[in-house]
Structure formats: C-alpha cells, structure tokens
Amino acid sequence: MAAIAPGQLTTADGTPLKVSFARALRRSRLKALGLVLPLFAFLLITFLVPIGDMLFRSVENQLVGRVLHRTVAALADWDPASGELPGEPVFEALVADFVEGRENRTTGRVGVRLNYELGGMSSLFRKTGRRAKRIREAPYRAAMIAIDERWGNLDVWRLVKRESDAYTASYYLAAVDLRFTAEGSIARQEEERQIYLRLFGRTLWLSLIITTLCLLLGYPISYLMATLPVRTSNLLMIMVLLPFWTSLLVRTTCWIALLQQQGVINDLLVWTGLIGEDNRLSMIHNRTGTIIAMTHILLPFMVLPLYSVMKTIPPSYMRAARSLGANPFTAFVRVYMPNTAAGVGAGSILVFIIAIGYYITPALVGGTSGTLISNFIAHHMQVSLNWGLAAALGALLLAAVLALYVLYDKLVGIDNMRLG
Amino acid sequence: MALPPYTSTLERVWFYTFRTICGLIFFFLIAPLIVIVPLSFNAVPYFTFTPEMLSLDPAGYSLRWYQDFFTNLNWQGAVKNSVIIAFFATILATALGTLAALGLSRAHMPLRTTIMGLLISPMIVPLIISAAGMYFFYSKVGLQGSFLGVILAHTALGTPFVVITVTATLLGFDHSQTRAAASLGASPPRTFFKVIVPIILPGVISGALFAFVTSFDEVVVILFVASYEQRTIPWQMFSGIREQISPTILAVATILVCVSILLLAATELLRRRGERLRGVTPA
Amino acid sequence: MQGKTIAIGLAAALAAGAAHAQTKLVVVSWGGAYSASQQKAYHDPYMAMNPEIEILNDDSASEGLSKLRAMAEANNVTWDLVDMIASDAITACDEGLVLEIDFDNALASAPDGTSASEDFGDMIVSECFIPQIVYSTTFGYRTDLVKTPPTTIADVFDLEKIPGKRGLEKKPLANIEWALLADGVALEDVYDMLSTREGIDRAYAKLDTIKSEVVWWAKGAVPVQLLADGEVVIASAYNGRLFSGIEEEKQPIAMMWDWQWFDLDGWVVPKGGKNTDAVMKFLRFATDTQRLADQAKYISYGPARMSSAPLVGKHATLGIEMGPHMPTAPANSKSMLPNNIEWWADYGDEMNERFNAWLAKG
C-alpha cells in the first residue's frame, strides 16, 4: 500500500478514501455482473450462439471445397474466362474425388447443393458418382464427358469454381431475387422466378395495414378507457387482456370458425339474405383472412402502450383548451393528440415488429396470397431443405427487426417496456 | 365522463356515436372468443351452428368433443408434456431472470443498456428466426427432439418477461432500505428475504406467470425443436388445424379460454398487491 | 369397470415389460389411416410373435428427410425405420443418410421362390429403398354438385363443363404435367416440353385459366375434407384417402382416374440407428408377400411385390373386393403418369421457385 500523504482522507483502517471508494465500486460492479452472469451465459448457449450459427449458415459453403478438394486445388490455375475446358489433371482429380466421394456418400450432397444454382447438377453428380469408379486410366477428360456430356459444358465448370470458396454470397443474392450469371457477374433473377422481393414488400405492406388498423381501432378504446372512472375502465380492460392472455392458436381457430365459407359469418349473411347461398364470401385462406386475424391478435399490443400514455395526460389540458375557446374537435387534435405521440409511436412499432415476423396465423389462414416471409423461411427449412437460403432470408428479416427495435429504443427506451 | 347539461346536440350525437364505435371494437375483441364456446358443444363434426342448435334442441348439443379430448391419447400426452415442459421452463426462467434483474437494478451495473438489450432479445427476435437458429444448433449438439432441448428453448424465450417484470418492481425501490436493514444488524440473507423478497415477489410471480404462458402457448419453436414425443397442446392444435379440423380443437380452445380467464384474474390480483406493497395508489 | 380393466391391462403390460428385455423400435410414418393399415398388417402381428419388440409410431414422415439430415448432423439418430416417398429416399441415399439394402439377402423371397429383387422388379428405384406400396394422386368429385361428371383431365381445367372451386396440391409436381396433358400434349412429349421455357410457359398458361378457382392443399387429409364440406367440387387427392371418404364415410364422392399420378412409397433404414439388426429382422417380416397383401385389406394402395397382387382380398371391415379399387386395376390404369423421379430431382428446385413465384403473384 502506498504511503499515505498527510491531509488525505482515510477510512478507519487507514486506506485512502479514494482507493477504498474505487474498490467498493469495483466490488459492487462485480456483484452486479455476477448476478447477471448466469442468465447471460445461459442465453449465450441456448439462444445467441444458435442465432449466430444460423447467420453463419447463410454464407457457409465448405461442402464443395471439402468433397471435391483435389479438383478445386487443380482448378486454381484455370481461368473461367478463358473459354476453354480445364485440362486433363483437373479431370483426373475429379475422378479421384468422385471415387472417394462415392465411398463416403458425399458427392450426392454436392449435387444437391449445386442444383440450387443450376438445374441438372443433381442428376449429373448422381450419375457420375455411380460410374466414375470404372474409369481407371487416362484420358480422363474424354472418359468423363463420355459418362455425361455436361462435363464438357463450360458453365458447369464455372459454377464448380465459383462455389468452391468456403464462403458464398449466392444465398443472399437468391434472397433478393438476384443470381450469378454463368460468367460470374450478378444479374436479376428471371422474371418468372422472382419472388422474395415481392414477398418482403408484401410482408411490409400487410404489416403496415395491420398496424394502421390496430391504431384506428386501438386509439378510440384507449381514449375511452383513459377517460372513464377507474372501476369502469378496469372492467373494459379485461376485454382487452382476455384475448391477450389467450393462446394465439385459439384465436386463430376462432377466426377460422368465423370466416370460412361454411362459417358463422357467411351463415349469418346468407340467413339474413344479404348474400345468396352461391355467393358466400371468401374471407379466409387469402389476404383478408391474414389481415383480420392478425389485427385481432395484435390489437392488445397497441392498446396497452396507448392506454398507459393516455392515463398520464391530465384532463385539465383539454379543459384549458376548451376554456380558451377551442371547439372540442380542435382541442382534441391540437392538444390531446400531440400528447399521445409517444404511445402511438411505441404501440405502432411494437405491432409492426411483431407483424413482420409472424408465422403461425398466416400459415393457417393466409392461403397463398396472405403468406409472409416467415412462411417461406419455414418452407425452405422443412420442405425444400435449402437451409442456406432459409438462413439468408432469416438474416434479412432479423436486420429489419433490429433496425426497428433500435428505433423503438430511441423512442421509448427498452427500460420502459411494460407488460400487462 | 357523464355529459354535462350544457352540451350541444352535436356533441350529444358524437358522444353516443363514439360510445357505439367503442362498443363495436370491444365486440370485435371479445366476440370471436365467445362464439366458439357453443360451437364446441356441437353434436356434428362441423364448425357451424346447426338448425338444431339454433332452436336450442338438446339433440343438437353434445359433449362428444370434450370426451374425445379427455380420452384421446394424442391430446392427453400433449397436456402432460405441456405441463411438464412449462413447469421446468418456468422454474429455470424465473430463477435466472430474477437474479439478472437484481443485478440489472443495482446502481453500479456496467454496460446496462447493452446487457439489457441482449437479455431481452429472445422477446424481440421473430420466433421463426429463433426457431431456425435453435433447430440448426440443437441438431448439431443432439438436443433436437429431446425434452431437455425444448425446456432450454422455452426457458430462453421466457426469461425476458421475468427480467422485465422484476426490474419494474425494483424501479421505485429505494436501496437505502437494504442499507437501513444492514445497519440495524440484519445479515445479508435476512435483508434479502425480509426486505427485497416482499418487494419483488409480485414481479417474480407475474414474471413466472408470463414465462409459464409463453411456454404453454409457444408453437413456432416447438414445431422445429420438438418431435412427436415432446408434442404439446399447441403442437397438437397446429397439426390438427392443418390436417383435420374436428371440433375437438374448439373444445380445447374453450378450455384454454377458461384457463386464460383464471390466469388473468391471478395477474390482476398480483398487480394490485404489488401496487399496494410499493405504496402506489391506483390512479 | 372400464377403468379397472385398463388398470389390469396396464399392470399386465408392465409385468410383461419387466419379464422381457424390451427393444423399442421407433417407426416413422404418415399417421392417420395409413399408419393404421401398417399397424394392423405388420406391427401388431410382429409384436404378438416377438414380445420383446415394442414398435412406437412417430407420425412425422412429412418432415422425414429434413429431420434425418438434422439427426445425421448431430450423430444422434433416434429413428429406426422411416417411411418415405421414393424421390426423398433417393436423395437420402445420395446423401448417405440411409443404409443400402441387399435385397436378396435381407428380404424374404416370394412364396414360389422368386428372389426379392425380381419380385419387386421395376419398383426398386434406389439401392436404399424398399418399396411398400404403389399409390396414386387422382381426382375425386362431388357427384351431387357437378352436372356432368368429369371423364378426362381436360375437364378438370374446363370451367364451363365443371364450374366451381377445385382443389390441387400446393406443389408443381403433377400439376404442370396435368396442365400440359389437358392442353393436348402427348405423354411422351411432356418432359421434353417442360425442359424448355416455352413448355413451362404453356403449362402455366393452362394453369392460369383456373388459378382463380383453385384451393391449394398441403396435407393428404385436406382435399377429402374440402370435398366433404362442399368447399370444392373436384380435387386431386391420394387414392387411399378418397377410398376411405367414399367407402368408409359414405360421402357423395366419385373418382376420376384419367392420368392418375403414380408414385411409390416405402421404407428406408437410417444410418447410425441403434437397433439396426432388430429393424432388419422386422423388415424381412413386414415386406414379405403376405404382409404387403394384408395391408391392402385396410387401405386401397397397391402392394409393391408382384407376388402379393393375387393375394389381395376383401376389405377387413367393409367386406368389399379391394382389387378394383387399386390404382393398378386395369379399369383404373388406362392412362397413368409415373413420377419422373430423375427429372424432378434435377429441375425440382427451379420448378418450385417458379411455382411459388406464380402463386405469390395472385
């Protein structure tokens, strides 16, 4: 311990106060961190690393380079722009890779992987895998082209070379309707195969509609509850909280029962004679179904922040405006509404964030025109098995959500997030 | 907000129009949940009101879908799994979340905002992305299709709610109270149980409730991380709605609505108790 | 009373469990009527003969390939036997996820001594795949809601002859072939056409004519339900599901077999499973001539062995001859469209992309 200068403040045991303070502060910090650490470590393993792993998958591309390692090494000197097929050593390496890959059952996977980029690669690799072991001596090139003439196609070789890097941008390109041309430059996807930009657009557009509807429906009832006596407003609040606490599958089921062609609303309309038996409305398995059901499901997320902001606006503001001569409408628009801006912002962003990532409800009631980007992420994970593309689409969606979240934090502050 | 005697006719008309509009919106919120209740007692396997039901003929009603729910092994297994998974996920999430909230609300927490952001990220990240990440990663480490995997995933999703509710109860907490207790000779554990616990308890319980409901209702992650063995009620409902819509789903939905009414009552009681304890009078 | 019986049964089962070293085989299949037919035809008799074996059903075959990949990646294979359609099985085989099968040694010969590989014949499309059944995707229509019964695939695309909604499976497979056939293309030209831009455009132009009237389905039980509810007047569906809708549930539905889509379904054995020996023994039993013929008593799918065909008898409960309900029956198979597995493995990715983009435009 340093010698104590005269006149310096010390604690009872003689430690300088400054040092003692610093130590206490450090201990307090460590204690705080120690309390947070278990959860942090837990989330790191169960949540954050998995998300990171997914993001990594959207660029990861080691398969081709690993399985066709000899070929890729031999291709290092080959110039794809030369317009000539690779030479004999490359084909010799390719045969060796195929013989090894046939034993390990890995060439089929390379075929499936490359087929995402160029149709036909799957069968090319399968067929070659079965026959390559019969090639025992030179000339390898002629023998391979004899197995399948596509080995004489420059585009196949350009593709193999392009996708032999350990990392690839092709999944991200596919996720925004772009593709590599055979020559390696980037171009728009063919018109008939463009889908994801439209889907992102639709997801944003539907989320915007749903957010607007939630605001239009949520604003009046929040206002009503904020201005009523507590006892009455608490009763009304139950009508908001009950759907909030009810499983979203239950609520989706309710809407299926209501909106189907043979459902309650159509029956009611036919019964009252508003529509004919043959003209039952299709309100489900399309965009309308998604919008109605999601507005219902997300409405509480709008009402809760709106209500909590409106509760804090003193009624005297409106009275003051009125007494200064404003008519009720002017007073409401010029005085009351600006004061609710924080609630409107918080509720809208919250609803919007939840809406753009929604999966279950669109999957059940969205049909084909009401599905969102999440449904395609699930499709690529479970059905088409193009996990890289699923990860790339997910990463783009995640980026959008995080950007909105930062906005929410700026506007509301995550510390002020309240529940129920 | 009763109408004062001097209101004009226009204001009077507006007043009633406004109330009607609000009434319709509340109707929109609540009616769908009510409609399915009678439908779940349907005697025929459709989602519609039959003429017998409308004429209140007892023959139009039956308990067969409830019977199906209580005897069908698929559903019974799902109920059991849901409870087991939600129970363990809640306990884990509550313990981890409460500790973290205590740390976060200490005066000298470094990097508070960043850490808070990371801790509540499971609530922000869209479920489909969490599901994708967990599916890939849990597969790699052998947790996919296991109870442990599902419980860990649901714990992760539930912790943000605990962190937020417990942090909120500590928001108005005056830390001099713990120092007062200490200076009066209370040991740290005694201080914790006598001073801190009563304050945070409502937050802990309502956080636990949120964590429980999160796990109990969760349907996206479970579809990916679980297999048939770990099927929960939402898992079973989702595959039911996609495959064969039988009114058993409506019976389950009705039961779940009743459960949420109970949960709602529980949280409301907790909220009032919490406000009373912290000395906040209801506005 | 019933409770007591169950309790006794449980106690007996527990006692039995204690007495034998149990081997649990996790068998993954499609659920519903299909799993039930397998349960009655193979699982139950096998468990009765081998009390030490317990067969557990997991109904997640629709995610079979995806989950198998995940398990292989984790080196944690929990499935013992998986039911798959042929095209998925070929992919699984290519990726090394499933075992190769030595047909003649691993499987039983036909009763007359014909070797297994000869008995299955053309049905062997991959060295990893043991075919069980031939199934078809064909059309069912509401007899009371259509004025003139459809007779050809062209009628499905004819909104004047058959007005109303129609149900189709939400994938390009079969639909684009049907579109071309309905447009007058000959079967032998279909895939040549589909390999060109113009051919695909032509198929979609044909599909465009009915797009607004199509309800898309994804799960096998749905089209029959859509028909039963009157939500559609005609729909493509698996022939076994249509059979149970018509014969077992007595719905006013009839079948139209023109250009039925022929496909195979069968078993694969995951590599790295924990009970491979026990599974191979079970497979030898479950795929023998009699068992495949027995399955046809419960569901109208054709057995994959030639030697099983003469043994197909009557439905177990309805007592009707099953022969005429098989997709392979001469009256039903006048025109058929076998799945071109190779072509779809190559162009499936592109076709799905285009199909999804086409749907999303709507």
Image (tube, coloured by chain):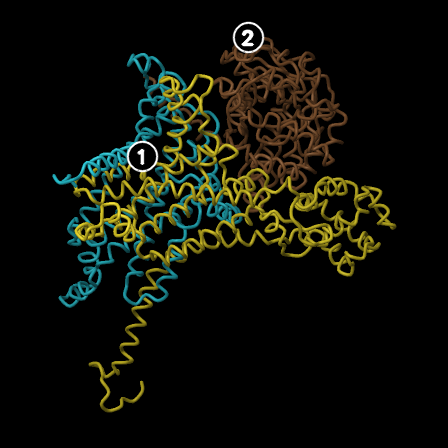
Instruction: Name the amino acid type tagged 2.
Output: Gly
Instruction: Name the amino acid type tagged 1.
Output: Leu
Are the residues at dot 1 and dot 2 in contact (C-beta closer than 8 Å)?
Answer: no
- Expressed as whole percent of the image width and height from the top left, the position of residue C254 reads 57, 13
* Disc 2 element: loop
Please report, as a chain letter, where disc 1 is located: B
- Expressed as whole percent of the image width and height from the top left, the position of residue C348 reads 66, 36
Q: Colour of chain C?
A: brown
Q: Colour of chain A?
A: yellow
Horizontally, residue A291 falls left or right of residue A347, namely right
Q: Which chain is cyan?
A: B
Dot 1 corresponds to which residue?
Answer: B29
Q: Nearer the viewer, residue B133 or A340?
A: A340
Horizontally, residue B138 falls left or right of residue B67, namely right
- Expressed as whole percent of the image width and height from the top left, the position of residue A235 reads 21, 38
Horizontally, residue C189 falls left or right of residue C350, namely right
Dot 2 corresponds to which residue?
Answer: C319
Q: Quarter of the image holding residue C237? A: top right
Please report, as a chain letter, where disc 2 is located: C
On the same chain: label 1 and label 2? no
Image quadrant holding the N terminus of chain B, namely top left
- Expressed as whole percent of the image width and height from the top left, the position of residue A129 reads 75, 43
Q: Quarter of the image holding residue B36? A: top left
Q: Nearer the viewer, residue A198 or A397?
A: A198
Q: Nearer the viewer, residue B261 or B25?
A: B25
What residue occupies the far left of the structure in this picture? B5
Q: Is residue A378 above or below residue A184?
A: above
Q: CA distance from mark 1 to mark 2?
A: 52 Å
Mark 2 Cα-neighbour bin, 10 Å: few <14, some 14–19, many ≥20: few
Mark 1 Cα-neighbour bin, 10 Å: few <14, some 14–19, many ≥20: many
* Disc 1 element: helix
